[in-house]
Image (cartoon, rainbow, N blue to C red):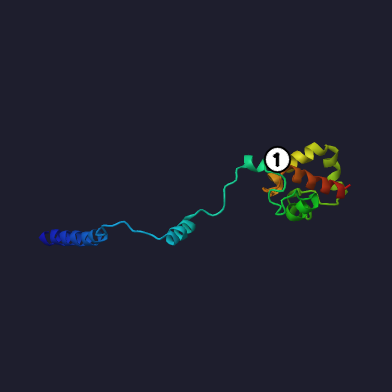
């Protein structure tokens, strides 16, 4: 039992020496401006957070690159084509009159609302989070025009 207490004491004391060695630094570490900047870049978060309320009110052409509003065809080719060319998740295919007939009969406002807010298998904004409402409406107009 005596030996066990001695072993525990030795282990405890040897465990404290490395900790004491870490605290021997007395001065604050000074970084150069370049080191500060490099550290800030490494620690900066990736990307930005966009709230749905901000996205819906995005100005036209928010992600178009050219500063202007993108056409319905451009939006379709960039974002809508993936589902509306193949009919994925029940999406009406571009040019398929039978797929669009009943939808068009409900009115353009219903179609616009479905594009902006989602409907059944379609997610809100068709995952085009950088599209303005006007751009989404233009893409709906394009699809309807090509599907009558």
> Left or right: 86 with respect to 4?
right
Few, some or many residues within 10 Å of mark 1 (<14, 14–19, 20+): some
Q: Residue at x 21, y 61 (%)?
A: 17
Quadrant where the image shows the N terminus: bottom left
Q: Position of residue 135 (x, y in %)?
A: 75, 46
* Residue 87 at least partly seen: no
Indicate the quadrant where residue 23 lies.
bottom left
> Which is more toward the observer, 138 or 6?
138
Task: Farthest residue to the left: give it.
Answer: 2
Indicate the quadrant where residue 39 lies.
bottom left
Task: Farthest residue to the right: give it.
Answer: 148
Q: Position of residue 53 (x, y in %)?
A: 63, 39
Q: Which residue is mark 1?
A: 117
> Left or right: 37 with respect to 91?
left
Please count the marks in the image: 1
> Which is more toward the observer, 36 or 20?
36
- Dot 1 falls on a residue whose secondary structure is helix
Q: Position of residue 96 (x, y in %)?
A: 86, 51
């Amino acid at each position: 039992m005596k030996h066990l207490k001695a072993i525990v004491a030795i282990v405890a004391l040897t465990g404290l020496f490395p900790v004491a060695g870490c605290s021997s630094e007395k001065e604050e570490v000074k970084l150069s401006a370049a080191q500060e900047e490099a550290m800030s870049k490494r620690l900066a978060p990736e990307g930005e957070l966009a709230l749905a309320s901000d996205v819906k009110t995005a100005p036209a052409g928010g992600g178009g690159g050219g500063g202007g509003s993108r056409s319905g065809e451009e939006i379709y080719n960039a974002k809508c084509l993936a589902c509306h060319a193949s009919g994925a998740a029940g999406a009406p295919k571009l040019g398929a009159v039978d797929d669009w007939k009943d939808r068009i009969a409900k009115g353009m406002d219903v179609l616009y609302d479905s594009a902006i807010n989602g409907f059944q298998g379609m997610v809100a904004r068709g995952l085009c989070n950088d599209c303005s409402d006007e751009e989404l409406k233009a893409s709906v107009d394009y699809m309807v025009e090509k599907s009558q």
